[in-house]
Amino acid sequence: MALSKRAPVVLSIALAASLAACTKPEAAKPTVDTGKITEAVKADANQLIADFNAHDATKSVSHDAPQTLGMFHGAPNVNNQAEDLAATKVQLADPAAKVSVTDATVDVAQAGDMAVYRATYAFTMTDPKTRTPVTEHGNWLIIYKPLPDGSWKIATSMIADTPSSAPASEKK
């Protein structure tokens, strides 16, 4: 009788031990190489600027994620690559269209699932009233996300112009 009372206990211990042996220890999370991501994002932003300045709308928009969101002052939001392509073609119809950036920085999330590119920009375009080139200055913020293929694409882009300084002769 003593054996039959102990059998369920022994069986339970054996079952628990076998389950413990099957359980895999939690895998260590891979270390995120934020430096590598920073360089990839900077390279992409630089190529985006080069593509825009080459007046290639298709290549410019190739830097977007499929459901990109663009927020630009004075214009309706763009909600995907097709809308961004249409807006970019309008901008690039202006032969004077050119962009440059300064003070570019990239911040990468520790998890490696997002990077933020920030810069000040100068955008030259033709003034529709005077038909002369004018340059707008402002801030540019781009949120990059990785795609399943490992590439980093623009999820959100925001541009905000900053007030231009009036020449001293115009200040009162």
Image (cartoon, rainbow, N blue to C red):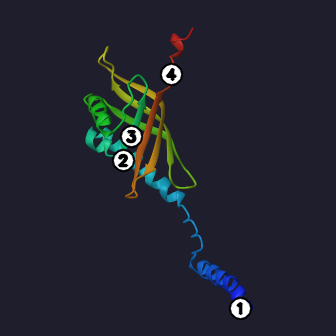
User: Which residue is most to the right?
Assistant: 2
What residue is disc 4 on? Answer: 163
Q: Earlier in the sequence, mark 3 or mark 2?
A: 2
Residue 11, picture quadrant? bottom right
Q: Is residue 166 left or right of residue 51?
A: right
Amino acid at circle 4: Pro
Residue 159 spot, x, y in % from top left: 45, 32
Q: Earlier in the sequence, mark 1 or mark 3?
A: 1
Amino acid at circle 1: Leu
Amino acid at circle 2: Gln
Disc 4/disc 3 C-alpha distance (Å): 27 Å
One can see residue 1 in this view:
yes
Residue 136 spot, x, y in % from top left: 42, 26
- Mark number for residue 47? 2
Do the numbered discs 1 and 4 sit on residues whose CB atoms are within 8 Å? no
Secondary element at tag 4: loop
Mark 3 is surrounded, within 10 Å at the Cα level, by few (under 14), some (14 to 19) or many (20 or more) other residues, namely many
- Residue at the image point whose x is 50% and y is 49% from the top: 114
Secondary element at tag 1: helix
How many numbered tags mark residues here? 4
What residue is disc 3 on? Answer: 68
What residue is disc 1 on? Answer: 3
Disc 1/disc 4 C-alpha distance (Å): 89 Å
Disc 2/disc 4 C-alpha distance (Å): 27 Å
Disc 1/disc 2 C-alpha distance (Å): 77 Å
Q: Is residue 48 above or below residue 37?
A: above
Q: Is residue 30 above or below residue 19?
A: above
Residue 146 spot, x, y in % from top left: 43, 53
Secondary element at tag 3: strand
Q: In this view of the protein, which residue sits in the foreground, 54 or 2? A: 2
